[in-house]
Amino acid sequence: MKPKKKQGLTTEEVSKVLDVSITTVKRYFDEGILTGWKNPINGRVVIDPKSFNALVAFTQKRAVTLRKAVDDFVRRGHKKG
């Protein structure tokens, strides 16, 4: 039996890379800045790696702070609220 391939990132993993709190990651998920799903068994948020990579790339491309990148990300049409 093969182990299951990991399909998403935990809020803990994302928070460490972005250097923000887990609460902030969950807020980004709730606002649609980061996409993913809630685990139906334990209710934990799982972040889609493509969404996470898009936000990181957007931040690096602009060489700005995460807060500025999130504001720009939303202004360019990504969902929020």
Image: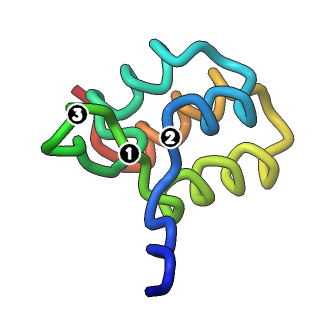
Secondary structure, mark 2, is strand
Image x and y of residue 58, in percent: 67, 52
Label 1 crowd (10 A; few <14 / some 14-19 / many >=20): many
Q: Amino acid at mark 1?
A: Val
Image x and y of residue 63, in percent: 85, 41
Looking at the picture, tell me which residue is in the foreground, 77 or 56: 56
Mark 1 or 3: the one toward you:
3
Q: Is residue 9 left or right of residue 75?
A: right
Q: Are marks 1 and 2 in contact (CB under 8 Å)?
A: yes
Instruction: Quote the CA–CA distance across marks 3 and 2.
Output: 13 Å
What residue did someone put label 2 on?
A: 10
What residue did someone put label 3 on?
A: 42
Label 2 crowd (10 A; few <14 / some 14-19 / many >=20): some
Instruction: Quote the CA–CA distance across marks 1 and 3.
Output: 11 Å
What quarter of the picture does the N terminus occupy?
Answer: bottom left
Looking at the picture, tell me which residue is in the foreground, 9 or 69: 9
Mark 3 or 2: the one toward you:
3
What residue did someone put label 1 on?
A: 46
